Image (cartoon, coloured by chain):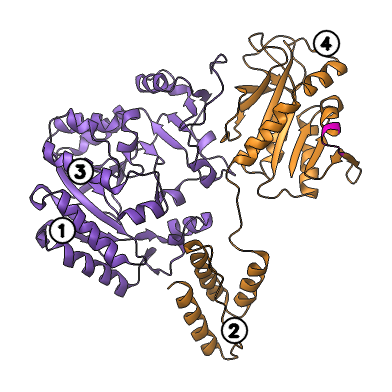
Chain colours: A purple, B orange
Amino acid sequence: MNPLLPPSPPKLFSHLYVEQKVANHPHTLKIMEKFERSQIILIHHYKEVFNRPNQNFSAQSDSKKLILAHKEGKFLHEGSQYSDGFDIEQFFYASSVMGCLYDCDYCYLQGLYPSANTVLFVNLEDAFAEVLPYLGDKTLVATSYDTDSLAIESLTGQTRLWLEFAATHPNLHLEIRTKSANIKPFKSVTPNGKVTLAWTLSPQRIIDQYEHATPSLEKRLKAAKEACELGWKVRICIDPVIYTDEFELLYTELIDTLFKTIPPEQLHQLTLGSFRLSQSHLRSLKKLRRSDIAFYPYDVRDDMATYPETLESHILEVLLKNATRYLSQTRIRTWQRQS
Amino acid sequence: MNYIVTALDAEARVFIEHYRLKRDTTLPYTVYKGKDTLLLVTGMGKTNAMMALSALLGYRLPGRNDNLINIGICGAPSEYELGEALLIHQLIDKHRRYYPDILYTHTLRETSLICVNSPVESPLSFPVDMESTGVFQAASKFFKLHRMAFVKIVSDHCQPDSVTKEGVVSLMKSHLGTLDSLLSSLQSVAQEHPLFSEEEFKEINLWKSYFTVAQGVQLEDAVCYFRLKDSARPFPFPKMEIPVSKRERSVLLESFIATLTA
């Protein structure tokens, strides 16, 4: 803590909580340089801030703090049944950030963590060491699971480090999923055919209503188009689809806008899937009482909440009908409950 | 309601006058009360602070938008100016650390604070007081972390003998404005409003009583959906007799939920 600093201004990351263990880590020092006007508070362990009882997620969402920490356990976790592993048997997600700058009403993170603050584990070198033993075989690592890593790339530089790591390991496939408009790391690294950049798109009305603090549809499309033009493999995810008034019109228009902006031949794949969540995460989401999305009368079976089967099929049917006007079915992946 | 917590009478005096507070003798602690303010004088030390505040908060449960400010004097290393007001972002008590959430703008210098058991005569790495962690531990059972603030005014550079009652009163007087502006800042953080009015809540509970517990949960989810989807619409509670048969009641519930979630 520097007692000579002026009072904290009202901005993102006005406070940086730094574990003593990583106070001198090169990434910590770089980040602290960028936030020289923020309050720096030394802590023993990130949980003493992140896991405090009686935090208010909604209030914190308007004034997020950053916690810099050392990951002690595993960085790699097995991919979830709610996500597509693209038929690669070794499918993991890497968790080097907890919490997200974006604030989407339907996101499982709201139910997952007791805090809206962001924890950044700076010892990414340990994640790379953990992946190495698997790289004898084809391995997929999703780097943007518990966060939108590109949203904080200018702060962390972690996506760029993953790209550089993947460039030297032929069996490593990366999926970087985002709503960000930041494509800076992709401009300075040679495109790698084993890296898929996946942009999540929603109609602007859904973005305004449910995807708080995220870039507009126009900005996301522009970023995705630019990445395609740079030679990166780009997948567009219209997933999760939120069923709402005028759903058909909104999502049909979205698909039309997508292909007006990005020629189908430039796109690697399109993923379509309606909203789904584990029952336990849905319960936590309900406790926050922030959004109608949490309270829709879902069909809950085998710990998974989805739209009722007929509605889920209808959603996919509508989307597929329009999408196949532009793209062959073989390049469209869909997510539907296996009943 | 704002809860102001001080350790000493001398720290409280100026606020009692400023907010026109009256002594309340309900509890065996020094409590003063006004229209929107409750002031508690805990006595010195963590244990006194924790016991007195727990008693007050147990007696008068705070609402979800109420705020608590612990304000008082502290000793500090010489780089902190005498008379300076500090906003505390970390409370240290031996190996335990506590963190109020500062989600608002303010003009104070922030710092950590060490809570000690007895006055210290040689400076530690941060300012010191004797009550803050007791206040935090009791208050954090009742208040969300962003509804609590700890303000300490530097009374001495770890020379406790130099502190006089008159000096403390004068220091607190010079920071009346600090307290007022901090209270406004705390109030500016997102206020929580219940989803339903009291009448709606009663009506929902009455409807839930007609059904099984599981059906009641479904109904509550549906009314939450309806309200969050559009806060302006009144609830379309069916105007009809509640059927006696379970089967008919279930049909009624199903159609009501379908209306609410359409």
> SS at mark 4?
helix
Q: Amino acid at mark 2?
A: Lys
Which one is in front, B234 or B14?
Answer: B234
- The residue carrying pointer 1 sits among few (fewer than 14), some (14 to 19) or many (20 or more) residues within 10 Å by Cα, namely some
- Residue at the spot 40% in from the left edge and 18% down from the top edge: A33
State whether residue B163 appears in this view.
yes
The residue nearer to you, when weighing A135 against A190, is A190
Q: Is residue B197 above or below residue B93?
A: below
- What range of the chain is rendered magenta? B17-21
Q: Is residue B54 left or right of residue A61?
A: right
The residue under label 4 is which amino acid type? Asp
User: Whole-Å distance between the Cαs marked 1 and 2?
Assistant: 49 Å
Give the amino acid type for the residue marked by disc 1 in the picture.
Answer: Ile
Which residue is denoted by mark 1 in the rendering? A332
Distance CA(mark 3)–CA(mark 4) = 68 Å
Does residue A81 lie above or below A222 as drawn?
Answer: below
Q: CA distance from mark 1 to mark 3?
A: 17 Å
